[in-house]
Image (cartoon, grey):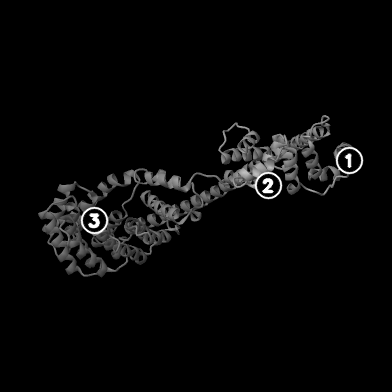
């Protein structure tokens, strides 16, 4: 029964493993991390297949949150619903994993920007600063740039300038130019035009002394300041066009410069050029650059007003209306798409559960069937082995009886006398007597006839009575054995030697001593080892010869 229970437990365990088996989360995450840099869309698709990341162990959960946010950010997808990033940050802090703390803080800051919570996003970027490695200037400058821009979006201008000044301490000219330019922007957003002009001019002077790829942008962006003359503004814009090529943004800047000087015809001419250029750059591709488009509409309205036209609001109004309706339609389309995706996800989940249920029923039925068949086979085999063993015991007992029934030749000692006495004491007689079948009654009568007296059914082998019989029947075998080898052999081994001396076979010894044949063989091996005998040497002859 114990084996049947063990089989059942194994079946249940295998069923559980098969029913719940799925690809290893660790291998999936390792594959996703390998894909994240070069194929973030593939990595995101792989992560999407794991439906219950919140059930992962903490280390794998943190890795999943980090990779999920990274691949969403790199593929320009929203991840505002992600709730595991904070937990990932806490885990990596506890592991002193600075690089992953930085990455998760950056992603958490970007997540807050998507939620339009710029102050909260700034908190994450500032939290990352204490984990920046002291020997990696590039990474430190990158985070300073993030903090500066995020502080601007959060209207914390002094914080933005603080980190711009930290950036100025580095020996990189390009970063110094950027820091000065950014300080100028922060003063501009804070409505401090004089300070904004001062730092913008410093950044431009440094950029022209050490040209880099951002020089055209700096020239264009600082050309519209009211402190500049018309000629200086135009010089900067034309130089920017010379370096980077003509664009609608440059042409619009020239139009604004002429508008500021009230040269309406020149402003209208360049505005028209800007609108044509914009159509080639953006509209023909079905795209919009909202800032430039809105500035062109604003400048068109200003020109119409300056020329005395009454409906000067129309350009701005029509453009803003187009943005409103386009945004509303896009929102409706997005909401509809979200509903459809949610519905498809529910349908897929329903079919998946149905399929899993069918698989569960099939696998459980299969294992129950296998367990039942295995149990039946084991029961039949066990029953058969017990029957064979019982038959062998009865056969050995029958042989003992047959030997005991033989009469000794006249004038010779009865060498089977010991077997007769032992049969009287044999405890198995009790089993024969308590199972009153026809065969057992016959067997019991034969045993009674051996000594012509009643057999004490409840008795067992009493070796204290049997040892003198061994001495009497076999020339003092027990006394010689005990004298010469009694200290080397234990009681069971002494009894085994006596039974061998009386002519008992291994199977017969197994019956009368209630030991398995394997145990009897092992005891014989132990006796030979203790007495220093050869493996095949006869134990009884060795004891007799050694005691002479």
Residue 144, percent across and down? 25, 61
Camera-nearest residue between 207 and 444: 444
Q: Is residue 196 above or below residue 269?
A: below
Q: Earlier in the sequence, mark 1 or mark 2?
A: 2
Residue receiving disc 2: 2
Say which quarter of the image contains residue 145: bottom left
Asked if the residue at tag 2 contacts the one at tag 1, i.e. Cβ–Cβ closer than 8 Å, the answer is: no
Residue of label 1: 452
Give the number of the disc on residue 444: none
Specify whether 185 is left or right of 456.
left
User: Does residue 411 appear anywhere in the picture?
Assistant: yes
Q: Position of residue 24 (x, y in %)?
A: 48, 45
Identify residue for label 3: 136
Image-based side of 143 in relation to 19, left or right: left
Q: Earlier in the sequence, mark 1 or mark 3?
A: 3
The residue lying toward the viewer, choosing from 397 and 236, is 397
Describe the element under mark 3 as helix, strand or loop. Answer: loop
Element class at badge 2:
helix
Q: CA distance from mark 1 to mark 3?
A: 107 Å
255 relative to 546, above or below: below
- The mark that comes first in sequence, 2 or 3, is 2
How many numbered marks appear? 3
Give the residue at x 22% y 62%: 182
Element assignment for label 1: loop
């Amino acid at each position: 029964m114990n084996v049947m229970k063990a089989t059942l437990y194994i079946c249940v365990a295998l069923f559980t493993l098969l029913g719940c088996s799925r690809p290893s989360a660790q291998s999936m995450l390792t594959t996703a991390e390998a894909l994240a840099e070069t194929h973030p869309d593939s990595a995101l698709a792989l992560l999407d297949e794991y439906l219950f990341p919140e059930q992962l162990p903490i280390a794998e959960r943190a890795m999943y949150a980090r990779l999920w946010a990274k691949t969403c950010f790199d593929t320009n997808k929203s991840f505002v619903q992600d709730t595991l990033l904070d937990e990932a940050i806490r885990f990596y802090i506890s592991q002193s994993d600075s690089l992953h703390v930085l990455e998760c803080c950056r992603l958490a800051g970007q997540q807050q920007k998507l939620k339009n919570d710029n102050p909260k996003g700034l908190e994450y970027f500032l939290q990352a600063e204490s984990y920046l490695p002291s020997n990696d200037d590039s990474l430190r400058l990158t985070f300073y740039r993030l903090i500066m821009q995020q502080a601007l979006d959060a209207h914390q201008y002094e914080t933005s300038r603080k980190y711009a000044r930290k950036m100025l301490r580095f020996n990189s000219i390009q970063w110094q130019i950027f820091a000065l330019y950014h300080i100028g922007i922060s003063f501009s957003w804070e409505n401090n035009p004089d300070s904004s002009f001062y730092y913008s001019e410093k950044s431009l002077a440094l950029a022209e002394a050490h040209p880099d790829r951002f020089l055209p942008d700096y020239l264009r962006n600082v050309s519209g300041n009211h402190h500049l003359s018309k000629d200086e503004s135009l010089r900067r814009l034309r130089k920017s066009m010379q370096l980077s090529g003509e664009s609608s943004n440059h042409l619009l800047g020239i139009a604004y410069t002429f508008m500021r000087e009230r040269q309406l015809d020149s402003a209208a001419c360049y505005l028209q050029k800007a609108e044509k250029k914009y159509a080639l750059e953006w509209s023909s591709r079905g795209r919009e650059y909202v800032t430039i488009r809105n500035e062109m509409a604003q400048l068109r309205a200003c020109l119409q007003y300056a020329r005395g036209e009454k409906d000067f609001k129309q350009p701005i109004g029509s453009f803003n209306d187009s943005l409103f309706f386009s945004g509303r339609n896009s929102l409706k389309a997005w909401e509809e798409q979200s509903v459809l995706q949610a519905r498809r996800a529910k349908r897929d989940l329903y079919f998946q559960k149905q399929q899993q249920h069918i698989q569960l029923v099939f696998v459980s039925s299969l294992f129950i069937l296998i367990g039942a068949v295995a149990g039946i086979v084991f029961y039949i085999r066990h029953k058969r082995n017990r029957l064979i063993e019982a038959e062998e015991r009865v056969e050995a007992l029958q042989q003992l009886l047959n030997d005991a029934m033989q009469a000794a030749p006249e004038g010779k000692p009865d060498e089977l006398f010991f077997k007769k006495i032992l049969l009287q004491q044999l405890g198995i007689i009790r089993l024969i007597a308590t199972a009153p079948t026809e065969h057992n009654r016959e067997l019991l009568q034969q045993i009674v006839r051996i000594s012509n007296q009643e057999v004490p059914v409840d008795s067992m082998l009493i070796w204290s009575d049997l040892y003198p019989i061994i001495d009497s029947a076999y020339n003092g075998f027990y006394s010689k054995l005990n004298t010469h080898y009694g200290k080397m052999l234990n009681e069971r081994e002494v009894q085994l030697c006596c039974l061998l001396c009386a002519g008992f076979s291994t199977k017969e010894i197994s019956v009368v001593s209630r030991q398995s044949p394997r145990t009897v063989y092992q005891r014989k091996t132990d006796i030979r080892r203790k007495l220093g005998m050869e493996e095949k040497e006869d134990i009884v002859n060795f004891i007799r010869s050694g005691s002479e």
